[in-house]
Image (cartoon, rainbow, N blue to C red):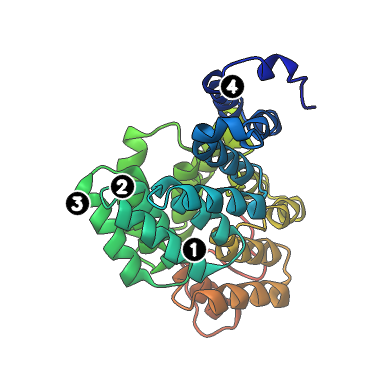
Amino acid sequence: MVKDYKYASSLAMRAQIEVARRHIDQGEFDDAIQILAFIVDNAKASKYHEVAFRLRGGAYLDSRRWRQAIEDHTKVIELNPRNSISFNERALAYRALNEDEKSYEDFARAIELHPRSTTYLTNRAVNLITQGQYDKALNDIYAALALDQDDVNALHLLSKIDYELGDYEQALKTLNRLIDIHKDRRSLFMDRALTKVELCNWEGAKDDFLEARKLAATVPPIQQRAAYHKTSEIIEGCCLLFVDDVPSAALEFFLRAFGNPTEKVKLHYLIGHAYARQGRADCATEQFRQALASRPQMAPCQRALDALNGVYNDEDCPIDPNLSH
């Protein structure tokens, strides 16, 4: 429930902005939006409009209100065409709406304005991976690593490409390195677990899924409510599928996680796994085909589809119509 903001109206504009920032940091997006609305609607506060629109655009982004986020960041860019933050965040909103061309253009502009930002480079790389343009994505990833050889997002994306292209050992090596340093990142444990699934290291995968579940339960409010990720739902679905062996419940979590285009292919793959565990080979096949329609080079999906269709007998393939572990 939005609080009474009469107290805020009496504060100096700068102080109100700081109050709004604190609400955003706590994931209290509606509270921040109401304070910032007072500033952007106040003509006398014109010198604060750029920061207020930018912060409100970020709050809209983090609360999944994509069009409002785009509108506010567009206003920022009109006020200051060199605001790279708003180009980056508007690109994220466009990506969430599957407006890939606009998203790419905004990331490109953000990088042009701030070429040493590893965040902007890796954000654009995510778009390129989603479109299956691995070579172009690698260019951005290597550019980010040239700026910071230990950049966690760049290395994580590198492991994702290795995984998707079927180099599971290299993906595992990179993820092991990252987890040695970043033991509090649920997404790293989840992706390492999925890599271990492909290697049929079931005990190791279960341990990592459980660690990811534990970390997902302790993330701060802003991450729990963050816009573009439904990582916790995917982790819980994986735990229900691979640890608890309850594929029907896992399906519910995977279906709930749809909406983020960057996770669409992963979700089709996981849903295919769940159907395979239920012995529903036709449904599993359809999910793998949908994944491959988006990313034809997705090695885990092709491997699973071939196994289900009897193209070859891969004894190490973790998919079988009657899979049981």
Q: Which residue is mark 1?
A: 103
Vertical placement of residue 111 versus 137, above or below: above
Left or right: residue 165 compared with residue 29:
left
Residue type at mark 1: give it: Ser
Please say if the residues under marks 1 and 3 sit with CB atoms less than 8 Å apart: no
Tell me which numbered mark, 3 or 4, is placed earlier along the sequence: 4
Alpha-carbon distance for marks 4 and 2?
29 Å
Residue sticking out furthest to the right: 1
| Foreground: disc 2 or disc 3 | 2
Q: Earlier in the sequence, mark 1 or mark 3?
A: 1
User: Horizontal and vertical percent for residue 132?
Assistant: 44, 72
| Badge 1: residue crowd in 10 Å (few <14, some 14–19, many ≥20) | many
Does residue 317 lie above or below 43 as drawn? Answer: below
Which residue in the protein does label 4 denote? 16
Q: Which mark is residue 146?
A: 3
Q: Identify the residue under disc 2.
A: 117
Residue visible at 37% across and 52% down in the picture: 120
In the structure shown, which secondary structural element does the residue marked by tag 1 occupy? helix
- Nearer to me, 242 or 175: 175
The image quadrant of residue 251 is bottom right
Residue 217 visible? The answer is no
Tell me where residue 318 appears, x and y as whole percent. 53, 63
One can see residue 274 in this view: yes
